[in-house]
Amino acid sequence: MNARFTPARASAPLPEPLRPRGRGAASNDAGRYERETRAPVDDGWTGAEAAAPKLRTTLIRDNARSIITRNDSPDISFDHSVNPYRGCEHGCVYCFARPSHAYWGYSAGIDFESRIFFKPGAPDLLAAAFRKPGYRPEPILIGANTDAYQPVERQLRLTRRLLETCLEFRHPVSVITKSAGIVRDLDILGDLAAQGLAKAAVSLTTLDAELARTLEPRAATPRRRLDAIRALTGAGVPVTVMTAPIIPGLNDHEIEALIEAAAGAGARQAGYVLLRLPLEVRDLFRDWLDIHRPNAAAKIMSLIRQTRGGKDYDARWHVRGVGEGPVAALIATRFRAAIRRHGLDTPRLALRTDLFRVPPEDSAQMSLF
């Protein structure tokens, strides 16, 4: 493998012999803020039989000074979130969070799914925020940016400790994930839900295991996600299924089947997001189409543009998540009909905030009562 330096350019897939196996992105171009990029080139000397180099995940310590993120986006259903990780091993090629890796000098491609920032101080920072004088509890969403139950959570257990902190303070919390790993925390989530303090959302993109394997290579299989919904429901945790993203021409034909399967597993509500292609995600997704759906790539991109006013993406509030035009309207109509048919159109569940209390610190004198 040779390397060359060129000016930053649009995404280009790595040569097939150099492409890591089991990853969602097919390229690793430098972030958009970098002045130069290093691109591996197949010079023909490696031989067709040579395997791609094994890519190991690298963990990067993030010594964050605060942990609660606040947003005022008018088309997002939450105001406060906590993200114990940046980057995500699941490798979903469509992930809207990929461009954020460029802020730290990394690629939105393979770097995003193999260089994972973790925040070891997250639970302590959360507890400190709850203890601040005048703190007013509002529901917190864990995993809004990248998945809180990606594989590294098995060892680091940061999400579990965040949930333990919420339980200790009786603070309302919700979690969104596409991992079956959430069932490992059923004990805490069940206790929180019994007090009206917790709910969960599980992302279900497709029921086609083969499509999921390439689109979301390291995420749980569709069957395991449905099993997770059943387990959460059985533990008393209200579950919303997110059929996201809906990709015209690729998985939109599954809308009704996804809703039926989620309802059968016990989900109480459902939502969807139309595929978003901001910044580097556009080229990464187009690379994916060229590799995995070459015969349908042009049609799929045409349908996507029909929902975005002829563009690959439209970032306007209230439009970015649902699109516009006849194709987007048909998707919305079918989705609404499906959730009505299966009873998943119930009002959004509000979590309680009136049970919040600040427990005594370990070093503090115990209360008499």
Image (spheres, rainbow, N blue to C red):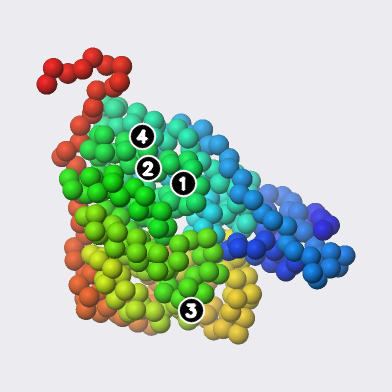
Q: Residues within 10 Å of mark 4 (few under 14, many from 20)?
A: some
* Residue at position x 51%, y 65% in the image: 216
Q: Residues within 10 Å of mark 1 (few under 14, many from 20)?
A: some
State the residue position of label 1.
153
Q: Are marks 3 and 1 in contact (CB under 8 Å)?
A: no
State the residue position of label 4.
126
Q: Residues within 10 Å of mark 2 (few under 14, many from 20)?
A: many
Query: How far apart, in angstroms, are the residues tagged by discs 4 and 3?
Result: 40 Å
Query: How far apart, in angstroms, are the residues tagged by discs 3 and 1?
Result: 30 Å
Q: Are marks 1 and 2 in contact (CB under 8 Å)?
A: yes
Of the numbered discs 1 and 2, the one sitting upstream in the chain is: 1
Above or below — where is 61 with respect to 203? above
Query: How far apart, in angstroms, are the residues tagged by discs 1 and 4?
Result: 17 Å
| Res 292 → quadrant | bottom right
Q: Which mark is residue 250?
A: 3
**For the residue marked with disc 3, what is the amino acid?**
Leu
Badge 3 marks a residue whose secondary structure is: loop
**From the viewer's perspective, is the residue at label 3 or at label 1 nearer?**
1
* Residue at position x 75%, y 66% in the image: 17
Q: Is residue 276 visible?
A: yes
